[in-house]
Image (tube, rainbow, N blue to C red):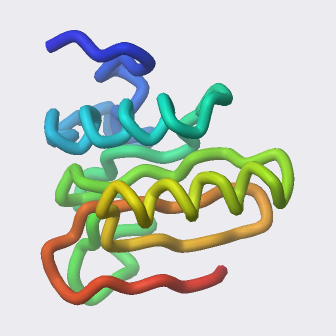
Amino acid sequence: MTYKYFKEEEFACQETGENKIVPEFIERLDQLREVCDFPFHITSGYRSPEHSLEKAKIKPGTHAQGIAADIHADNGIERRKIVEEALKLGFNGIGVAKSFVHVDIRTTAPVMWTY
């Protein structure tokens, strides 16, 4: 599948190289990138259940489901824009950190958190 702003390889697990990112998620991320109108650098996409961060959890999270990504954000303006537009586009999981914003398309109750 071809996307406007991303290549599937960008989402490979950084520890195992596996890549089970869900195409629908990349399509939604493409829409988010379009409306934000600035480049996205994906700092974490798919994570294998064997990834150290996932193994530390009781149950692997949305990264291991292939429906999440962390987007680098240079400043508060970018963080706010990503969050505002992600909410409009129906992303149900949003985590805000100093240097990135986590977005996902979980099907459970919508949630937002800070790191």
> Which residue shows up at 24% across the image and 73% down it?
60
- Relative to 66, 16 lies left or right: right
> Which residue shows up at 67% across the image and 29% down it?
38
Q: Quadrant of residue 109?
A: bottom left
Q: Quadrant of residue 9?
A: top left
Residue 18 image position (x, y, % from top left): 24, 35
Which of the image's four quarters has the C terminus?
bottom right
For the image, the number of numbered tags is 0
> Which residue shows up at 49% across the image and 46% down it?
44
Which of the image's four quarters has the N terminus?
top left
Residue 49 image position (x, y, % from top left): 23, 61
Does residue 107 lie above or below 105 as drawn? below
> Which residue shows up at 59% across the image and 53% down it?
82
Question: Residue extending furthest right?
Answer: 75
Residue 21 image position (x, y, % from top left): 21, 40
Does residue 44 lie above or below 19 as drawn? below
- Relative to 81, 35 lies left or right: left
- Relative to 97, 29 lies left or right: left
Q: Which of the pair 13/84 is nearer the observer?
A: 84
Does residue 13 lie above or below 112 as drawn? above
